Amino acid sequence: MGGSLLVRTTIVATAMAVAAAAAAGAANERTPTPAAGAAAAGRGTVLVTWSFDDPVDTGPDTLRVFQNARGRVALSPELRVSGFTSVELTDVPGDHDFPELQGFFPLAKNGRLALAFALLTTDATQELNIALAGPGWFTLDPDGIAFWLSTRDGWLFHTSDSIPKRLLQLTPFVWYRVFVDYDVARGVYDLTIALEGDGQPIVALRGQTNAGAHPGSAVDLFSFIGDNGDDRSAVTYYVDDVIVATDRDVVLPAFVAPGRRRFFVDLLAPPAAEGRLPLRCPTALAPADLGLGAAEVARLQAANLLPRVAAWADGEGAAAPAPGAAELQGLPPEALAVAAWHYGCALLRPQATARRDPAGAERALRRAVQLAPSAPLLRLSWVIALAGAQRWPEADEQLATLRQWQEDPRLLLVAATVAARRGDPQAALDWLAAPAGRDLAGRRDSLVLRHWYHLLLAVGRHEEAARVAATMAGALADPTAAAAWREREGDADFALRRLAEARAAYLAAGGARPATDILLKLADVAFLLGDAAQERSLRESVYGRLAATP
Amino acid sequence: MSPTRNRWPAAVALGLFTAVAAGAAVDGPQLRALVAAQDHAAIKALGPAVLPQLADLYSHTTDVAGRRDIAQVLYVLGEKSPAAEKALLADLHSPDKSLRIQVQYTLGRVSDDERVVQLLLDSMRHGETMLIRDKAACALAYDQIHLGERQKVKLFAGLIQALDDDKRDVRAIARQALQIHTGQDKGYDPDAPPEQRRAAITEWQRWLLEYRANL
């Protein structure tokens, strides 16, 4: 307990020290940097500190601004707690949108995290919402919202254990300083609120369960908005001196370009481009793949089970029940095997409401193999789950039993996935060489060929990757597929720093109305070409602009 | 990084009549044509006065497809309307399954009436088919957009009661609706033995007491 108190004292002291420094004008930064306060405190890192006294380079490692419709997010000299300006957020009812200021920092999955900011509202009866959230975004699910402040009927609430709890009656045009000290692993926080210039807290809560009551709920962003979607708020409020600090020693990579520590091209690349081929069950193409011979199919038909089993075999649709569930009682083994396969495969994919569960997938797919040992696709899917669990010898052992399938591209893809996942992209390329060569020669836009391209990038064979992409882009009749390959050609050219070629490829891929990813990749190209105005324009078309009120 | 915007909880597309001045009135046939075309923008532009008109049109429409179309429009508008609530309630037990499901969905979006919550809870627990029960749970999970915190207590209380239902599917959908509202399941498993389920229900009841105490 003594240790945690010390840590708490240190990071909050750090946050407060940085706030004080900001108030004194010492932290007037265009981009967030590890603050001297953290170093002075001897441990931990200040991840971001914003005093909003200058225009900000928005981006994935700084801030994102939404001011669609009639709402506004802007720097304002009207009211501020330090320096010269704060951020003013204005929501307008009935405009179909809400203004938002989002801030990003490195993902905190453990340790303690302090969030400090100053808040002033001009009308306490109008709704506003403030959250600290994680990769699950703005939900009450795990890794969603950890800390949530909101206003209703003049009161400030925090949501703890999914319950909105009253904190205080807000007074308009008064600055409140808010400090949150969040213990990520325990999923609890301490909350302190004080009036500006008054050392005595008016709220001092300890050990509050986080918003959705999820211990270990990670965080990597904060958000300030008006109403949360009912479009009835007419709030104008101000935010100043936002600080996020952690008790961990975090090395923040340098900014490679405005607003980002990695180029958009790298950020947007799929994991396969780093050799991490996706853990996906292969598709069933025939009943026999799943161990369903003519006799089994007839038996399922007779029992009126065929539609249900066929839906599971498709790999889509409603989730199959977990192995052992009451609904499955009395079903024949062939149906149970397909249900276990469907259930296990679903656990390999991130779900809307559940986390990926590789261990649960492995158990379910092992069960499927036990129920139908001769079904090759079930065993192949189990291999994928074993790779997800990094159980390499077992994965190799099971793959070796499937020699009779060695010409099937699905086996080759699984073998390549195992090799790539264990850190050997060259071996993965070897597995895919023959089928990828055939697909390239036949100009077939296959999953094998796409993985082949990404693996070429992963091993640094960019020239070859660019040639594959250019060949496919030029050959495909389907404009969507051709554009995707043209974008891949641009990515390979960017890796080679052939910037004119990359830009031409991205422009060709984007067409008349380029998608967000293309705009951001063009921003990277513009930056490396030294065209600062174009870079800013492209980046801000996605991440917004935080500038003074016109 | 996600270049697309992620919405906050409870983000719903409401009707936004707050910003729309009363538009020009339309007669019955014109409104019927707009409904048939599902031209939500044009209907929205007519302003709040269109709500009782839609309710009246609903009551005087005899075919199921026509009623379903009007209910769909009211769903999209998402505005409170006692007249629409009254009209829709007449079809809450319609023999036509698709109309009944649409009515279940729409009721919460035109009303903040606790009676509607009770009726949907009843449909979730005692509807004749799993489909009807499931869709009532969906309505309770996603479409009770006008409820205040006090009214939500009734909703949560009903869902927690349903965790003890004899029917497995009811227990599962009640758990799911609670999870959608709160992000939590309190360790409740609809397939667990009764004594284990009971322990989780006790946790939910404690939570509800705490929720109520914070009103």
Image: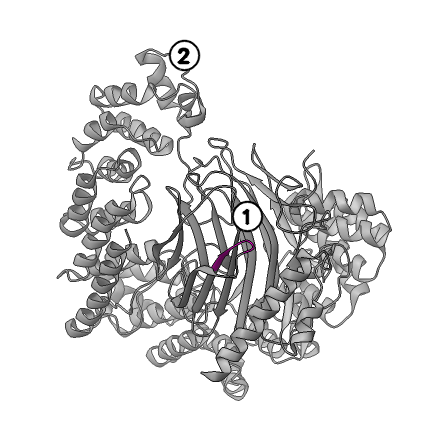
Q: Which residue is mark 1?
A: B5
Q: Dot 2 lies on which element?
A: loop
Magenta segment, principal secondary structure? strand
Residue A410 to residue A512: above or below: below
Task: Please state if A225 lies on the left or on the right of B102 as rendered.
Answer: right
Task: Please state if A426 lies on the left or on the right of A371 as rendered.
Answer: right
Kindly tell me whether residue A149 is visible in this rendering.
yes
Please state the extent of the stretch shown in magenta in the rendering: A193-197
Where is residue A498? Give x, y as percent: 85, 56
Residue A173 counted in the magenta span: no
Q: Nearer the viewer, residue B133 or A408?
A: B133
Amino acid, disc 2: Ala
Q: Quadrant of the N terminus of chain A?
A: bottom left
Q: Which residue is mark 2?
A: B24
Q: Residues within 10 Å of mark 1 (few under 14, many from 20)?
A: few
- In primary-sequence order, the first of circles 1 and 2 is 1
Kindly tell me whether residue A478 is visible in this rendering.
no
Where is residue A55? Give x, y as percent: 73, 47
Q: Dot 1 lies on which element?
A: loop
